[in-house]
Amino acid sequence: LDPKRAQNFNRTTVGNYFNMRKEVDDRYNKIPPEHNWNMDEKGNQMGGGRKGDGTKYIFWIEDKEQYRMHSDNLELVTILECVNAAGTAMPPFLVLSDGPVADHGDIEGIGG
């Protein structure tokens, strides 16, 4: 946890947040759960960088070549995910340095 986030994760700050949320909810006559969304983001490197990820690979003992190819691509990708209070989730959204990834929702096995 980032130290700045940890510093602000305390009873007073969290209490103030929920008090403000209640004020907004009261002002707009109870916002329905399906209109109450939460978003999170996660940054990753495409190729994983130079550090190992701890993944173990099993090879047959008689295999002559026991290598696994990997990319050294250090390009960053951001993954966005959104879920509402009713439990509905949007498909993850990927953002690369070139901009958002094209919609692949119609591709079997990728899209919803």
Image (cartoon, grey):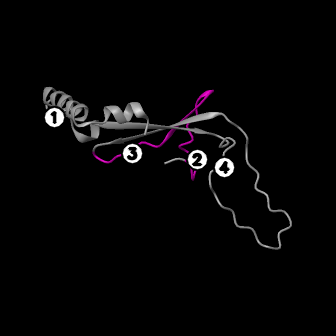
Q: Quadrant of residue 63?
A: bottom right
Q: Amino acid at mark 4?
A: Gly
Q: Quadrant of residue 76?
A: top right
Secondary structure mostly seen in magenta is loop
Q: Between marks 1 and 4, how big is the CA–CA gap?
A: 48 Å
The front one of 13 and 43 is 13
Q: Between marks 1 and 3, how big is the CA–CA gap?
A: 21 Å
Q: Amino acid at mark 3?
A: Ala
Which residue matches tag 1? Answer: 30
Q: Between marks 2 and 3, how big is the CA–CA gap?
A: 19 Å
Question: CB atoms at circles 4 and 2 under 8 Å apart?
Answer: no
The front one of 111 and 63 is 63
Which residue matches tag 4? Answer: 52
* Helix, strand or loop at mark 3: loop
Q: Amino acid at mark 2?
A: Ile
At x 86% / y 67%, what residue is drawn?
64
Which residue matches tag 3? Answer: 89
For marks 1 and 4, the one nearer the N-term is 1
Which residue matches tag 2? Answer: 107
The front one of 76 and 94 is 76
Q: Left or right of 82: which side holds 27?
A: left
Does 40 sit above or below residue 53? above
Q: Which residues are the magenta region?
A: 86-110
Q: Between marks 4 and 2, how big is the CA–CA gap?
A: 31 Å
